[in-house]
Image (cartoon, helix red, strand yellow):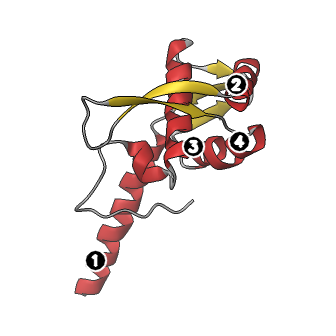
Amino acid sequence: MVILFDQFHLPNDVFDIVFATDQQAIAARMLLHEIKRSGGSLGKTEMSMFVKTLHAGTTIEVRDKKDASKSKHIAISYNRRQFYDRVLTPLKSMGLIDYDLYKKKYTPSDRFNASLIAIGALWLEELKRMER
């Protein structure tokens, strides 16, 4: 997945940087909230139930990006396949969420941070090569 960002106008939310659409960012936030609510991990069955709920549609309260004191209720529904393809798969491939094949559990991960640090180190190496 490609992340494009402007270093001078970084949003305060990582999901707004990682995902191209507000709906994807909202669905990712909802997933992380669900993982937190269920003790820090979701099994395959719990993930399936979450995605079914999302597929059926739900109403959530969202704060206005320009004025945090204002909020609005929006209806959100996500097709099961689209959720897995556009939200869960990118979260796993970027290292924001891990899936343990043996325990069959989804958990938040810090590998995203480690990957960004490694990318920064590669850039520093490139700068050193340019100085020679």
From the viewer's side, name the closer residue of 58 and 127: 58
* Residue 55 position within the rendered picture, expressed as x and y whole percent measured from the top left: 72, 31
Could you give the CA–CA distance between mark 2 and mark 4, rounded to whole angstroms? 10 Å
* Residue 106 position within the rendered picture, expressed as x and y whole percent measured from the top left: 63, 27
Q: Quadrant of residue 45?
A: top right
The amino acid type of the residue labelled 1 equals: Leu
Q: Residue visible at 55% across and 45% down?
A: 24
Nearer the observer, disc 1 or disc 4? 4
Could you give the CA–CA distance between mark 1 and mark 2, rounded to whole angstroms? 43 Å
The answer to whether the residues at label 3 and label 4 have Cβ atoms under 8 Å apart is: no
Could you give the CA–CA distance between mark 3 and mark 4, rounded to whole angstroms? 10 Å
Task: Tell me, for residue 84, which label it has, or none.
Answer: 4
Going from N to C along the chain, the mark reached first, 2 or 4, is 2
The amino acid type of the residue labelled 2 equals: Met
Nearer the observer, disc 3 or disc 4? 4
Task: Tell me, for residue 127, which label it has, or none.
Answer: 1
**Residue underneath mark 2:** 47
On screen, residue 50 above or below 9: above
Q: Residue visible at 41% across and 48% down?
A: 16
| Quarter of the rendering occupied by the C terminus | bottom left
The amino acid type of the residue labelled 4 equals: Tyr
- The reply, left or right, for residue 129 in relation to residue 97 is left
Could you give the CA–CA distance between mark 1 and mark 4, rounded to whole angstroms? 38 Å
**Residue underneath mark 3:** 91
Going from N to C along the chain, the mark reached first, 1 or 4, is 4
On screen, residue 31 above or below 37: below
Q: Residue visible at 57% across and 59% down?
A: 1
The amino acid type of the residue labelled 3 equals: Leu
The answer to whether the residues at label 1 and label 4 have Cβ atoms under 8 Å apart is: no
SS for tag 1? helix
